[in-house]
Image (tube, rainbow, N blue to C red):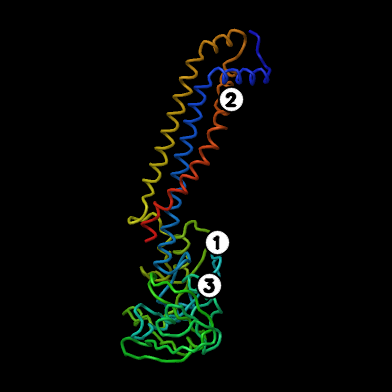
Amino acid sequence: MVKVENKETLRLLTKRFMKMNRARNIIAVIAIMLTSLLFTSLFVGSVSMILSKRATEIKQFMDSSHAIAQNLSEEDAERLQKTIEQDEDVERYGSGIFLGAGMDERFGFSVEVRYADENMAESFNCLPTTGRLPEKENEVALSSTILESLGVTPKIGEEVTMTWEVNPMLKQYKTDTFQICGFWQGDKAVLGQMVWVSEAYAKENRYPVTQEELENGIYNGEKEYSVWYKNLWNLEKKTEKISKAAGFTKAGTGMEVNPAYNLFEEDSFSFSSLIIMILFVILAGYLIIYNIFNISVKTDIRAYGLLKNVGTTGKQLKKIVHMQAWRLSAIGIPIGLLCGYLAGLCMAPSLTADAAN
C-alpha cells in the first residue's frame, strides 16, 4: 500500500469535505457556539454574583481586609503586632483603638469614636476624600452624615464638639471640641459612622481596659488590627498560624478571617452546586458536538473508505476529521465566548440585584 505523506493533500481533502457538508458544518458551528456561550455566561454570571456578595459583605461588616483581630488588651496587641510584622505571608496591616460610642441625641444612627492609621481607615472604607486623617491632638476626621446631623458645615478648619462614652458601666463621658481636618461622604446603610481622632488623643484618653473586662463585654479602649495577605489562598490556615504564633489558643480569640471572604459557607453560595452546573453545561455541550461529528463521520464513511483504498492511513483519516473539528471550533468558540461574555454582563444586574439591596 502506498502511504500518502503530503500534508497539503490532507488540507485540500479537509477543505473539500467541508465544502461538501456546508449545512452540517453550520449546525456544528452553532452547537459549538451555544456550548461556549452557555459556559461563558454561566461563568461570568457566577463570578458577578460572588464579587457582588463580597462587596455587600465588605460594606455590611465595614472591613475590606483579609483578616481581623478585635477586642485586644495592650499586652495581647503588642504580642500580635510583633507576630504580624514577622510573618512572610502578610503584605500590610493596619491598627486602631476603639475609644467609645458617640453620644448625641441628634444621632439617629450608631457613631463610633476611634483612632485608626491609614490602612485601618481604608479597611473600614472611611478614608477622608477631602483633607486627611488627624495628626494633631485637637484634630478630627469624620463622615458628612455626622456633620449634617450636628448642623456643622463639612469644611476643613470648622470646629465640631463631640461627646463620647469612655466607660458604659461607669457612665463616664468625655466632651471635646475638635477642628475638622478631613471628611468623606457618609453612608447610612453601613453599621456605624466613624469618627477618627489622632493617635496622641487616643492614647491619652482611652480607657485602660483589662482582659477580664474585655471578656465581660466592655470594649472601650480595646485595640484591633486589619491584615492583608499577599494572596487569597488558604486564608484560614494563614490566619490560624498567626494566631497560634501569637499565643492565642482559645476559640474566638486572636485573628479571624473576614466573613466577606468566606464565599462558600452554608448561608452563602453552594460550591458543589456551582461545580455541578458547570459540569452539566460541559457534558451537554460535549454530547451535542460529539453526536454531530459522529453523524458526520458515518455520513462520509464511503468517502473515507475510498481514501483508505488509495493509500490513506487510519491516522491520516483521523487527522482529516480533527482538522475539520479544529476549523469549526476556530469559528464557533470565539463567537460563543464573546456572546457568552456579553450575555453574562447583561444578566449580572438581575443576578446581583438581591445582593445589592
- Percent coordinates x, y for residue 335 in the rendering: 53, 37
Above or below: residue 60 compared with residue 110: above
Cα distance between the residues tagged 3 and 1: 15 Å
Q: Amino acid at mark 1?
A: Lys
Task: State which tag comes first along the sequence, 2 or 3.
Answer: 3
Quadrant in which the C terminus is drawn: bottom left
Q: Marks 1 and 2: CB-CB under 8 Å?
A: no
Q: Is residue 76 left or right of residue 119?
A: left
Q: Amino acid at mark 2?
A: Met
Q: Amino acid at mark 3?
A: Asn
Above or below: residue 172 compared with residue 356: below
Cα distance between the residues tagged 1 and 2: 44 Å
Task: State which tag comes first along the sequence, 1 or 2.
Answer: 1
Q: Secondary structure at mark 2?
A: helix
Q: Which residue is mark 1?
A: 230
Label 1 neighbourhood size at 10 Å, few (<14), some (14-19), many (20+)? few
| 1 vs 2, front mark | 2
Identified at 43% across, 48% down, the residue is: 347
| 2 vs 3, front mark | 2
Residue 323, label in figure? 2
Identified at 57% across, 9% down, the residue is: 306
